[in-house]
Image (cartoon, rainbow, N blue to C red):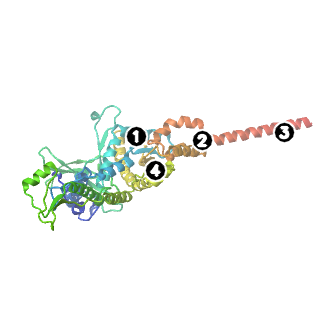
């Protein structure tokens, strides 16, 4: 695990060689049966992973503020060389994390079974104990910054957990030292995951996990192995999008341009202040010049009237207004590419919804929804491993399956709150199932818990279709009985 920390002196296109997005590692095999095949696949995958790792490391440090402008050199007046980093890369990654992982990913039950709903609620509680919200944020940071992220899941022994805790744990590991190899088969299922670690003697060890075995490989040899009891590889990849492009690299040249503009802008101000002094038709020695700089004044004498003496500064001030226009245009272009909302001020007369649409918040929401299925697909694979461990440890019902669980990626819950509340009332009054109505209105981050807690109150307010039908049948029966009694009464009076 050699150190990758470096200075981002080059531009990103020189590091990725024009091939943007992390490369998917695909094997020619459909299965790995022994250690020899695992070693062979590892050796084939490492060159691709090492290139991905260089790119991930560059982007990681770029977001942290290590950007090429800090290493620029000037040939003309090198003493005036301002190096300004406007770290918009940090801004866009924070926005993406807040947009997609500001609320933890939640699980809701699909059916109407009370038993299944309670098991799903228990699952959410277990994952909350393991700080899933924190690991989702870490994962989202890697996704947005570097284009891909991973989750590592493992089981725990009974003596390693406290009462009420799940017998598993997980984390979002560093993608520079973790990767997944995929099979060439249909759908490209995961074939083997690799975690790069150091042993006690500071030697690099590769932990290669297949669905049946875990191999410890060092120096091209298998130095240990054990059975993988989960039946699935522990590492699950969470790509940022199908191309594995990071949000940063999409507009990284624009950020470099803004840094350059801002640095040159400050250089222009400083060069104007520290302008060269020009002496025309007069001579001055160094001592006199230094004295002039100290007292701020100079007396010169014209020797030849036809050639008058003159002293002034050589300066050409930068047009700050045009520079600001250029900078604003670059920034708006980046926001457009990323689908981020603008920062325009309200000009008056706009409603909240009009501002929401005009500034691009609705477009940002739609862009987030495009990448949502990518995250959900990986989340299902993560959930399969979690369910398998919890069932094996008998901490959750064996009846609960992946088909019983829906994945809910929650975002802003306070926007248009009144409209959402009105939609909830309308859906309930029109006979939509309360669970579906609560999930659809998107008011809460944990709709499963809200439904379970609200069910007694909802049952009291809204009758089910069966209850309504029973009431109608009872009313119809009463009407028939009343009509029959009236008919008999009229017949008796007639006799």
Where is residue 464 shown, x and y percent of the image?
60, 41
Reading the image, the residue beneath label 2 is 464
Mark 4–mark 1 Cα distance, whole angstroms, equals 41 Å
Q: For this rendering, which residue is in front, 155 or 322? A: 322
Q: Is residue 392 visible?
A: no
Q: Quadrant of the C terminus?
A: top right
Marks 2 and 3 close (CB-CB < 8 Å): no
Query: Of discs 4 and 2, which sits in the foreground?
Result: 4
Find the residue positioned furthest to the front. 305
Sort mark 4 into few (<14), some (14-19) or many (20+) by Cα contacts within 10 Å.
Answer: few
Which is more N-terminal, label 3 or label 2? 2
Sort mark 1 into few (<14), some (14-19) or many (20+) by Cα contacts within 10 Å.
Answer: some
Please determine whether, in this image, residue 482 is positioned above or below residue 318.
Answer: above
Query: Of discs 3 and 4, which sits in the foreground?
Result: 4
Q: Judging from the image, what secondary structure is the residue with disc 4 in?
A: loop
Marks 3 and 1 close (CB-CB < 8 Å): no
Mark 1–mark 2 Cα distance, whole angstroms, equals 27 Å
Residue at image position (10%, 52%) is 290
Query: Of discs 2 and 3, which sits in the foreground?
Result: 2
């Amino acid at each position: 695990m050699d150190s990758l920390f470096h200075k981002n002196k080059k531009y990103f296109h020189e590091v990725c060689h024009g091939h943007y997005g992390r490369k998917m590692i695909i094997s020619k095999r459909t299965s790995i049966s022994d250690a020899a095949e695992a070693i062979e696949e590892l050796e084939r995958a490492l060159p691709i992973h090492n290139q991905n790792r260089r790119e991930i490391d560059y982007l990681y440090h770029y977001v942290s503020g290590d950007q090429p402008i800090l290493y620029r050199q000037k040939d003309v007046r090198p003493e005036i060389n301002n190096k300004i980093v406007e770290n918009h890369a940090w801004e866009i990654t924070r926005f993406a994390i807040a947009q997609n992982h500001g609320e933890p990913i939640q699980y809701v039950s699909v059916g109407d079974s009370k038993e299944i709903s309670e098991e799903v609620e228990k699952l959410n509680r277990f994952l909350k104990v393991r700080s899933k919200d924190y690991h989702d944020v870490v994962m989202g940071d890697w996704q947005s910054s570097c284009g891909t992220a991973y989750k590592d899941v493992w089981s725990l022994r009974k003596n390693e957990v406290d009462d009420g805790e799940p017998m598993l744990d997980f984390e979002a590991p560093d993608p520079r030292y973790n990767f997944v190899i995929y099979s060439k088969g249909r759908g490209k299922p995961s074939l083997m995951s690799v975690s790069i670690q150091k042993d006690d003697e500071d030697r690099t060890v590769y932990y290669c996990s297949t669905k049946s075995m875990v191999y410890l490989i060092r120096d091209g040899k298998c130095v240990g192995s054990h059975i993988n009891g989960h039946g699935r590889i522990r590492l699950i990849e969470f790509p940022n999008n199908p191309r594995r492009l990071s949000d940063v690299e999409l507009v990284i040249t624009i950020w470099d341009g803004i840094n350059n503009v801002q640095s040159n802008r400050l250089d222009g101000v400083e060069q104007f202040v520290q302008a060269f002094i020009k002496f025309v038709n007069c001579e001055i020695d160094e001592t006199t010049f230094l004295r002039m700089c100290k007292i701020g004044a100079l007396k010169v004498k014209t020797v030849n009237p036809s050639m008058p003496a003159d002293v002034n500064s050589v300066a050409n001030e930068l047009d700050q207004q045009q520079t600001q226009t250029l900078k604003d245009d670059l920034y708006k272009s980046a926001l457009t590419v990323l689908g981020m909302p603008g920062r325009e001020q309200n000009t008056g007369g706009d409603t909240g919804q009009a501002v929401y649409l005009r500034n691009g918040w609705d477009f940002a929401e739609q862009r987030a929804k495009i990448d949502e299925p990518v995250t959900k697909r990986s989340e299902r694979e993560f959930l399969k491993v979690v369910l398998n461990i919890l069932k094996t440890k008998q901490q959750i019902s064996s009846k609960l399956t992946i088909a019983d669980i829906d994945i809910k990626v929650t975002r802003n819950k306070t926007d248009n709150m009144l409209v959402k509340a009105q939609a909830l009332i309308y859906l309930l009054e029109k006979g939509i199932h309360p669970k579906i109505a609560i999930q659809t209105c998107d008011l809460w981050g944990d709709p499963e818990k809200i439904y379970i807690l609200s069910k007694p109150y909802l049952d009291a307010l809204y009758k089910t279709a069966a209850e309504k039908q029973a009431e109608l049948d009872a009313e119809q029966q009463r009407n028939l009985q009343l009509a029959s009694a009236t008919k008999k009464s009229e017949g008796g009076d007639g006799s």
